[in-house]
Image (spheres, coloured by chain):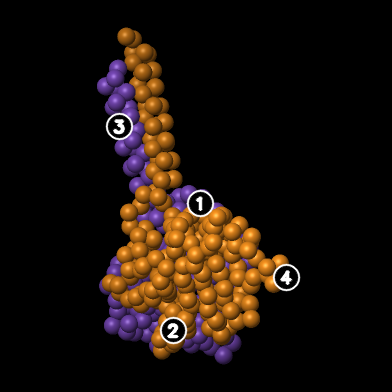
Amino acid sequence: MLLRLLVTMLAGTALGLAVTYYLLGNGVSFDEVQSGPWTRWPKSGSMNIDPYAHAMLARTAELPLAAAEGLSFFARTDSAGESLKARCDYVMSGQIPSSRYWTVSLYGPTGSIIDNPAQRFGFTSAEILRAADGSFKLTVSRHARPGNWLPVGNVSTFVLVLRLYDTLFDVGMTKAEAAVLPKIVKGHCE
Amino acid sequence: MSLTDRLLALFLYGLGVLFVAGLVHLIAVLAMPEIAPNDAFARLSAIAKTGQPVLLPQPLPGHELTPFEDPALAQVVCLFDLSHGSMHVRGEVDHETLLTLSFHSRDGRVFYAMTDRAAVHGKIDVRVVTQPQLQALQAEDDEDNPPQELRLVAPQMQGFVLINALAAYPSQRAAAEARATSMNCAPEAVAQN
C-alpha cells in the first residue's frame, strides 16, 4: 500500500515536471496574440504578466519591452505559416504601424545574435531605404542583395523581431492587426 | 480480487498520478520566477553593483547578456535594493532621440515604464521607494511646494531600472551610450522613524 502510494507520488512528480519542462520550452501562454506571421505577448511587459510567460522569461532571462516603451512582435514563420529557413530568401514588405521609431532584427531560434560578414544584425526605421511613396522592402538572405539586405548567418532557422518604439498603435485592435503589419514572403530556396 | 476491482484500483492510482502531476506543474510554474538560477536579475547582478549605473556591453554575436536584445539599443542598468533606502533616477533628455526607462522587480515583472516624452521640462526625476519610505517622504513634504519627483512603490525590495537609448544609425552608438549613461541613479536615504 505504502509502496504504491510512493510510486504514485513519484510518477506524478515526474510527469508534472516533464509537462512543465515541455510547456515552458515550447512557449505556451494564455496571453498570446497572433496576427499573420507575428506573435506578441501584450502583458509580458507589465505586472499582470501571464504565469507561464513569467516562468518562461525567468528561464530564458529575456527582458520584455514594457507596454509604455513599445510593442514587440516575433515571427518564426512566413506569411504562409511555414517556418523561416536560412536557406531561403524572404522579402518583408508592407506597412508598419505609426511609431516614433521601429527596428527589425534577426536572431537564432533561442534569441542569439547571428554573426555575419556584413556585421548587420538589424535595421532601424531611420536607416532603412524607402521608395518614393514611403514603402520599404527588406530582403533576408544568406547572399548579398541590393537595397535593404538583412544577412542570415550560419543557422538553419531564424526569428525576426519587429519592435515599435513609442507607438500609439492600439493594443486592443487585434483583428485588424495582420493587415497593418508587414508581410514576410518566401522567395528562392537553395 | 476480481478484474473489475483491479481495474478500478488502477484507475484510482492513475487519477492520483494526474492529480500529483497537476499540483507539481502548478507549483513549478509559479515558483520558477523565484528559483530560476540564471534569470535576468542574476545576469545583470553579475556585471553591475547595486546603486551604480552600468553600461551593458553592446549586443554582438557571442556577447549577448540576455536573449533577443535589440542590437540598436544602448542600455544602462541600475540595480536597486530598497532596504538601504530609496533609489533616485534623474537626468535630462533632449526629446530628439528615443530614451526609455523600465522598472523591473527582482522576479522579472515590469512595474513601470516611460519614454523621454513623459519628461517634465526636459527632466526625468523618479524615486523608487517602498510603502513605508513613501509615507516617510510624504510626511516631510512641503504642502505649498509639492515635490516634482515621481514616486514609484516597488513590488519587491530588489529590482533594476533599465535605461534604453536608441542608436538610429550604427554611427550614433557612442552618442546613444552617452545619453543612456547621462541618466544618474543613486541610492538615497529616507528618514524613517
Kindly indicate whether the residue at mark 2 contacts the one at mark 4 (C-beta within 8 angstroms): no
- For the residues beneath circles 4 and 1, the answer to whether they share a chain is no
The residue beneath circle 3 is A10
Residue at disc 4, secondary structure: loop
The total number of labels drawn is: 4
Which residue: 39% across, 27% down? Answer: B16
Quadrant position of the N terminus of chain A in the picture? top left
Q: Do tag 3 and tag 1 residues touch (Cβ < 8 Å)?
A: no
Give the Cα distance between marks 4 and 1: 43 Å
Q: Residues within 10 Å of mark 1 (few under 14, many from 20)?
A: some
Read off the residue under disc 2: B178
Chain identifier for the orange-coloured part of the image: B
Name the mark nearer the viewer: 4 or 1.
Answer: 4
Instruction: Name the spot of residue B106 as percent of width and height, x first.
Output: 43, 57
The amino acid pointed to by label 2 is Ala
Identity, as a three-letter code, of the amino acid under mark 1: Asp
Visible in this render: residue A155? yes
Marked residue chain, label 4: B
- Left or right: B181 as drawn, with respect to A15: right
Give the purple chain's letter: A
Circle 3 residues within 10 Å: few <14, some 14–19, many ≥20: some
Identify the element where label 3 is drawn.
Answer: helix
Quadrant in which the C terminus of chain A appears: bottom left
Q: Amino acid at mark 3?
A: Leu
Disc assigned to residue B144: 4
The chain identifier of the residue carrying mark 1 reads A
Judge if badges 3 and 2 mark residues of a common chain. no
Task: Say whether disc 4 or disc 2 marks the residue closer to the N-terminus.
Answer: 4
The local secondary structure at tag 1 comes to loop
What residue is disc 1 on? Answer: A50
